[in-house]
Image: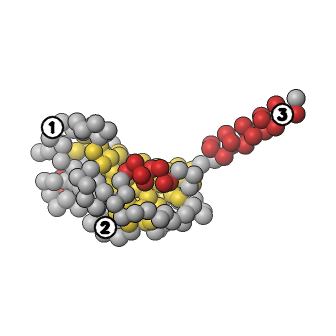
Amino acid sequence: MRTIALSITLLIATITAVSAQQTLSVTSPAFPANGLIPSKYSCQGAEVNPPLSISNIPAGTKSLALTLHDPDAAKAGGVTHWVIWNLAATGAIPENFKGASQGLNSDGKPGYKGMCPPSGTHHYHFKVYALNTRLSLRPHTDKAALELAVQGHVLAEGELVGLYSKE
């Protein structure tokens, strides 16, 4: 009976900890949530990242990490456009940002890769993590490795989805 009570107590503590995780608010002055991303940020424009604003960052956040992913791409697993970590927890990522640690996109190159779907409208997921640490990762880290590294360190997360299709 004592073992069952202890197990229930641990289960409740785990559920409380998981449900207590905050949600970040991720927005951009360049486009609304589920709205069209301007071509400036694509392969048809300047191919620079759009500015992003992150709010509701919890106390104790040591750094932010971000991935930009297109799950609609024909490539198995989609296409990753940006992998970045050790961002300052200021809540602002300016346009054409070159700071922090930038990992590999799906082209195997570091930094931002603009949207360039061959056809149709694709969904682009800007996923941001508030972390309780700074990450020590190799420079050529990809999306999968970053997602593995943040496990156990996420205080909050949030996502902004934008749409793009070639003109």
Q: In the depicted view, which residue is nearer to us: 47 or 26?
A: 47
Asked which secondary structure carries label 2, the reply is: loop
Q: Specify the farthest residue to the top.
A: 1
Identify which residue is drawn at 14% across, 44% down: 166
Asked which secondary structure carries label 1, the reply is: loop
Relative to residue 131, is residue 143 drawn left or right? left
Instruction: Identify the residue position indicated by label 1 in the image.
Output: 119
Q: Does 18 sit above or below residue 96?
A: above
| Sequence-wise first label, 3 or 1 | 3
Q: In the depicted view, which residue is nearer to us: 11 or 159?
A: 11
Relative to residue 62, is residue 27 drawn left or right? left
| Sequence-wise first label, 1 or 2 | 2
Which mark, by number, is residue 3? 3
Nearer the observer: mark 3 or 1; the answer is 3
Residue contact at pointers 1 and 2, CB within 8 angstroms: no
Location of residue 161 in the rendering, given as x and y in whole percent from the top left corner: 35, 45
State how far apart marks 3 and 1 are (Cα). 58 Å
Location of residue 4 in the rendering, given as x and y in whole percent from the top left corner: 82, 31
Say what amino acid the circle numbered 3 marks: Thr
Asked which secondary structure carries label 3, the reply is: helix
Instruction: Identify the residue position indicated by label 2 in the image.
Output: 97
Q: Quadrant of the C terminus?
A: top left
